[in-house]
Amino acid sequence: MGERVGILVISYGSRAAAVIDALNRSEDYKARFYVVDKQRNPFNVRHATKHVVIPDLDVGKICDFVEANKTEIDFGFCCPEKPIIAGVRDAVESKTGVAMICPTKRYAIEESKAAQRLLLEECCAEANPRFKLFPCASEYESVSEVKRAVWDFLDEIGDEVAVKPDKPAAGKGVGVWGDHFTSRERLFEHFMSIFDGGSDVIIEEKVEGEESSFQAFCDGKRLAVLPETRDYKRAFDADIGENTGGMGSYKDNKDWLPFMDKSDREEEERMVQKIFNQLRGNASNEGLRGIPFYVAFMHTGKGAKILEINSRPGDPEIQNVLPVLKSDFVDVCFRMIEGNLSRVECDAKATVVTYAVPMDYGGYRVKYSGNRRVDLSSAYALQEQYGDNLRIYPGSMELREDGHTYALGSRTVCTVGIGESIAEAREISLDGIRNIDGALWNRGDIGAEYHIERSVGRMRRGRG
């Protein structure tokens, strides 16, 4: 049976289902889950010894739940960014003594994009695009004065820029020249929509290239790097439409992506290690425990740039990795807490994650007033055919008193296909999606061969 271990999981979306699934596969430990959830996620309810719904993931309420169950909980794992930024680890550890796997509030690096840029200037300036911060609390006397300051910066670096809120916006607050606006006036409208909302704004040069997601577990002393993944932020096929939380992602059967080579991977590791060294002071710093570096890289013909850094596991990217984790995940968690993590091993398999989402998500429909009931039974039945090569992780989905499950407002459910190649993994993932019964839609080109070939071609041309 294995040694019994109690694990707190703070959940939001399919990412938490993937975490629970990986912990549940331990051969050395028998996991019991104490889940804090935004809603009654059917996967989490099924696997939890105790399940509580805290819709706003308030840190005080989370602490109360942990305090009531602390004699049964060995450690906690926080998945979403909001509680991490709010200091959930600091609060839980100080009030209950339960060790948490996530960075402390001080190292919740995604709280401020401006702080990230300044950090990179100190330790890894080559990864920084040119940028300027526009603080909303500045003494601008009028909108025209703000506009003049923006115009002056554009005169300096050119119009092809990205406009971002300083605070986290789940990837949805970013405006990019050529995608969201093609004139300075439209750019400034986007700028003011953020500025008037009370957030500082960053304008930075638009970086052209191929994007990858870098993730690493950390025990405070060292990083254990995970395989590279590629996320699809845009709502629709061919990378058009608005930015979303991520419509899907893929990983190859090796540690880097098809458009990368080993030296690209080594460059990423070198950059992130420099950031890690800066934050830990070249010593040990357990405040960084967890996944302190989920980094969006843009690979260009002149090297890699960092678009942003997050302090939690990626969604959907962690769903690519956890199903093929060869290391015992419970053991990995204990090693992070104990400070003796060395490396994490994964099977040499490709994975593709595809999200099914509500009709009114991502601008697919302006409005949908129909039935939101979703039935996963046919998709689960496919697991008899595919076995462990198909995983189904409910996300923004709710189990109600009538015994049925319903889609909520965000990404409803993802399927993970696992195969010897990206193409094989993609077919399994899409087969799972096709067998979900409900008014949902999905991108059909996640991990598609033509999309990957386009990325390979662009990188080849960029390198000259």
Image (cartoon, helix red, strand yellow):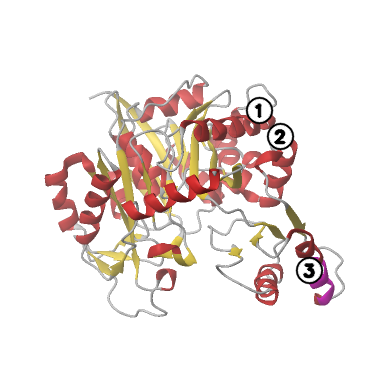
* Identity of the residue drawn at 70% across and 59% down: 203
Q: Which residue is mark 2?
A: 123
Q: Is residue 442 left or right of residue 204?
A: left
Query: Is 329 colored magenta in this rendering?
Result: no
CB atoms at circles 3 and 1 under 8 Å apart? no
Give the mark toward the camera: 3 or 1. Answer: 3
**Where is residue 104 drawn, in percent x and y?**
60, 38
In the rendered image, the vertical position of residue 43 relative to residue 389, given as above or below: below
Q: Is residue 47 left or right of residue 454?
A: left
Q: CA distance from mark 1 to mark 2?
A: 9 Å
Mark 3 or 1, nearer chain start: 3
In the rendered image, the vertical position of residue 399 relative to residue 26, given as above or below: below
Q: Is residue 168 left or right of residue 212?
A: right
CB atoms at circles 1 and 2 under 8 Å apart? yes
Describe the element under mark 1 as helix, strand or loop. helix
Q: Nearer the viewer, residue 124 or 375?
A: 124
Q: Main secondary structure of the magenta part?
A: helix
* Identity of the residue drawn at 72% across and 61% down: 200
Q: Which residue is mark 1?
A: 277
Q: Which residue is mark 3?
A: 151
Mark 1 or 2, nearer chain start: 2
Query: Is 145 colored magenta in this rendering?
Result: yes
What amino acid is labelled 1 in the image?
Asn
Describe the element under mark 2 as helix, strand or loop. helix
Q: Which residues are magenta?
A: 144-149
**Circle 3: is it few (<14), some (14-19), or many (20+) Cα within 10 Å?**
some
